[in-house]
Image: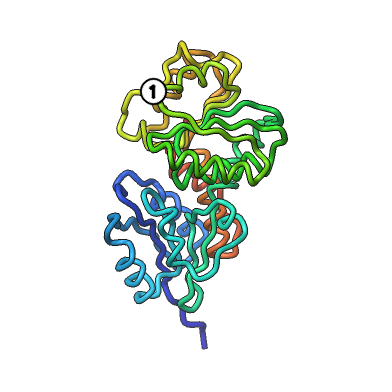
Amino acid sequence: MGLEKSIKTYCIIGDPIEHSLSPAMHNAAFNFLKLESSYIAYRVTYLELEASICSLKEVRLAGFNVTIPHKTRILKYIDVLDRVATQAGAVNTVKNIDGELYGYNTDVGGFLRPLMKRGINLNGLNILLLGAGGAARAVVVALSSKAENLKISIINRNIDRAKELAKIGNTLGAKCESFSLDDVLLLSNRADVIVNALPLGMHDEKSIIDAQNIPTESIVYDIVYKPVLTDLLKNAKQAGATVVYGYEMLLEQGAESFQIWTGIPAPLEVMKKALLGPFGE
């Protein structure tokens, strides 16, 4: 008698969600490995989160990813948090085990790996971080875990959220300060690394940092992955800076999520091809 197969379903929740490339990436991986699994995008508004989590548990969804604006608010619905998610105070990956939700943060490793693959030494660098939401929290945890004598300047429209994130970074050993948007150009001019963890750029908006205010020797990392070349990255290229693309973080965090759910190493090249097409960047 053969073993009965059951199709496992995964999804990503957030708002907006129509831009997400996660379904294409994960379904390509499932198909390549011939796994009986599927992945969909599920729009969940700010006010629908609790009801939606209950629905996902009721339909026995195997797992899901979490994106804007739910990465921090999801914490109250998680039964078991892993160490990295606890440090970040944010969850982007959830696994459903017999009705209990286990929360992880794969953004931390996903953010770091593109930098590590480039052989970048982060020790002693001056970091400018735009944003103070769930993704920015992962960035602070990631940088703090891999670098010594690190200075992180955090800019956010809501200065209270920037101050809160600065406190988290300081407890992790980084030297963090919060600033207002008015300081962005002053800080960008003396930054070794500029990281955009705001959704700004997702709809082709102009960057708040132009090419003239990006040092040539700096590294500019935009975690927005669609479009591939955001206005910030265009400005960085014009300035002669090193660029790190948002799709690289998306790919790496997605691969880690895939392994958490399936226990199988993710087929990275297959997932990358699904993100970028057959011709790459």
Above-or-below relation of 244 to 136: above
Task: Name the residue: 50% across, 13% down.
Answer: 239
For residue 63, say whether it is visible: yes
For residue 119, say whether it is visible: no
Colouring scheme, one of rainbow, by chain, secondary structure, one colour = rainbow
Picture coordinates of residue 86 (x, y %)? 57, 57
**193 left or right of 38 in image:** right
Task: Name the residue: 54% across, 59% down.
Answer: 104
Residue type at the position of mark 1:
Ile
Picture coordinates of residue 64 (x, y %)? 43, 61
Picture coordinates of residue 154 (x, y %)? 51, 33
Task: Name the residue: 44% across, 18% down.
Answer: 235
Find residue 113 and report its image quarter: top right
- Disc 1 is placed on an element classified as loop
Find residue 172 and report its image quarter: top right
For label 1, the crowd category at 10 Å Cα-Cα, with few meaning under 14, some 14 to 19 and many 20 or more, is: some
**128 left or right of 151 in image:** left
- Nearer to us in this view, 85 or 120: 85
Q: Which residue is mark 1?
A: 208
**157 left or right of 4 in image:** left
Q: How many marks?
A: 1
Task: Name the residue: 52% across, 54% down.
Answer: 89
- Nearer to us in this view, 50 or 270: 50
- Nearer to us in this view, 161 or 89: 161
